[in-house]
Image: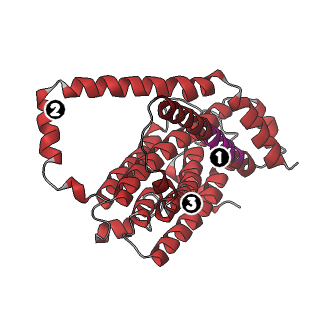
Amino acid sequence: MSQLGLIIKNEYKTDISAKSFWIATFIVPLIFIAFSIFGGYMMSESETSMRLQESILGGPDNSNVSGLQIVGMLMGMFLTLFIMMYGSQIFNKVKTEKTNRIVEILATCVPGRTMMMAKIISVGLLGMTQLLLWGLMIGVVIVGVFMVFPIDFPWEHLVVPKYIMAVVWSVIYFLGGYLFYGALFAAVGAMTDKNNENQEYVAVLTLLLLASFYIAQYAVDHGSATFVLACCFIPFTSPTIGAVNTITHSIPWWQSIISVISLYLFAAGAVALSGKIYTSSILLKGKKLTPSDIITFFRSK
């Protein structure tokens, strides 16, 4: 097995055996559901909140909202959430590894770019495992509900080709966006080993993801706007906005393909450039990298 495969296997086994993974997989969703129910109940009892909701939803005719628009809105939200969540995990893993003296020995025999890619892939596999477990949990709950309460559900809608393609496009955009942002989070994590430094870089990446989320919600109803179309080809926003516009058929198929190709090209460039930063800075202790240091690393071989 290659060095990359061995590191990925070790990282994955270590992460999946940690208690924090199982707590985040089973306990956190229950807390989130309980909080959502409690928050919804409190808002329903608040007259101000109800008037605000009526003023927002009472304007446009919501009956004209199509199924693809709803799917696009949900996918844009989930893509942003997952990229942000797993990108933060990569940042924390790289940052923690820099404080471990064993990495200095490992760096002498394994290229830094290989270690960085192992972090990105292992966290991605961990996320897929978590999503699979959540899917099984949701499936068990749905089956239990239908066994207890027989409901006439239009199951034929689940196999409609346009919805299947919406999921396929979402996966394609998510993988490209995850590689792009994962490489950036890994590079930021490698810039320093101090917990109170470089938070501004993380804040910038987080704000970019939040901006792409809000623009994606706007794109659900205004997919043909010039600003939205431009965001489909910008790597910082295309993972969500490109997915939303493709799902809602706001852009032709050839523009979707160009958007995906450009996203993966930028992702490959981000991996290469971030690999240089990771390799050059992995042995630096207690030094915060400046923009001039980063430019120097980009020019290095």
Image coords of residue 16 (percent x, y): 69, 31
- Residue of label 1: 120
> SS at mark 2?
helix
- Residue of label 3: 172
- Of the residues under marks 2 and 3, which one precedes in the sequence? 2
The magenta region covers: 118-129
Crowd class of label 3 (few under 14; some 14 to 19; many from 20; radius 10 Å): some
Relative vertical location of residue 217 with respect to residue 102 in this rendering, above or below: below
The answer to whether residue 123 is magenta is yes
Residue shown at the point (23%, 23%) measured from the top left: 42
Q: Which dot, 1 or 2, sits closer to the camera?
A: 2
> SS at mark 3?
helix
Between 42 and 157, the one lying in front of the other is 157
Q: Which image quarter: residue 172?
A: bottom right
- Of the residues under marks 1 and 2, which one precedes in the sequence? 2
- Of the residues under marks 3 and 1, which one precedes in the sequence? 1
